[in-house]
Image (cartoon, rainbow, N blue to C red):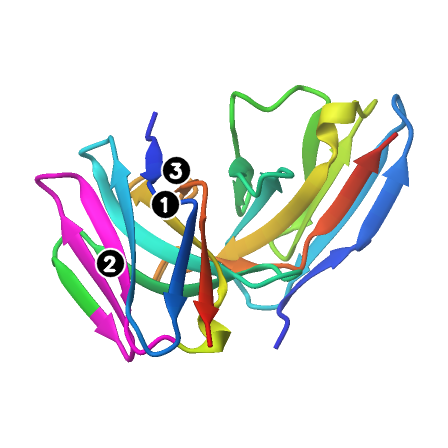
Amino acid sequence: GEKVEQHQSTLSVREGDSAVINCTYTDTASSYFPWYKQEAGKSLHFVIDIRSNVDRKQSQRLTVLLDKKAKRFSLHITATQPEDSAIYFCAASMANSAGNKLTFGIGTRVLVRP
Amino acid sequence: ETAVFQTPNYHVTQVGNEVSFNCKQTLGHDTMYWYKQDSKKLLKIMFSYNNKQLIVNETVPRRFSPQSSDKAHLNLRIKSVEPEDSAVYLCASSSRDWGYEQYFGPGTRLTVL
């Protein structure tokens, strides 16, 4: 089955700097890659996603890049703010997977320092 | 605004007991899920349920069983809990017709003594 690796367990950045979180996946059939955010004591919240028919997607301060050849995708957060502090999970699934099954990475804890 | 509701928030029980968790979504979604998040924050899919079709993750022990009365409700029953079942159980829903985005509930924290 699919395996998603998230390579940084923690990431500390200064407020206003950029943060980059990297993930890799194993199954070439994966075609949907969402990112979720979990703030302390709260549940998961969708932040952005990308499908395999594009290699870049931007939403305000968030950009997702997808390199299908390397089976790698990344989340870029620009102009970080204190409220960006959270655990970020990457995930992957196949478009035709039964029940839209997501395989998650282990999460990257992002700390934005003042 | 919460659209996926879970009860209870917390549950403490002893090994061997049976527990049941409830989940309701008001988004009109066709698909619902149960995830387990362990103490290291690792998230694993347990079940997904699309209308009347249940998709089971083969790694889930048989003491876990989902129960659905309609597409807005997906409960989780655990027969004879074990210490390794201590975790946060997250319910989620999504529409297969758009976006694949999943909406998560607040979770139920289970502690097995």
Q: Are marks 2 and 1 on the same chain?
A: yes
* Nearest the eye: B78 or A44: A44
Which residue is at 36% across, 45% downward? Answer: A8
Looking at the image, is B66 positioned above or below residue A90? above
**Left or right: B12 with respect to B108?**
right
Tag 1: amino acid: Gln
**Left or right: A39 with respect to B18?**
left
User: Which quadrant of the view contains residue B72?
Assistant: bottom right
Report the residue marked by disc 2.
A50
Span highlighted in magenta in the image: A58-80
User: Label 1 lies in what chain?
Assistant: A
Q: Quadrant of the N terminus of chain B?
A: bottom right
Report the residue marked by disc 3.
A98
Looking at the image, which residue sits at the far left?
A: A69
Tag 3: amino acid: Ala
Please give the label number shown on residue A8. 1
Looking at the image, is A81 positioned above or below residue A45? below
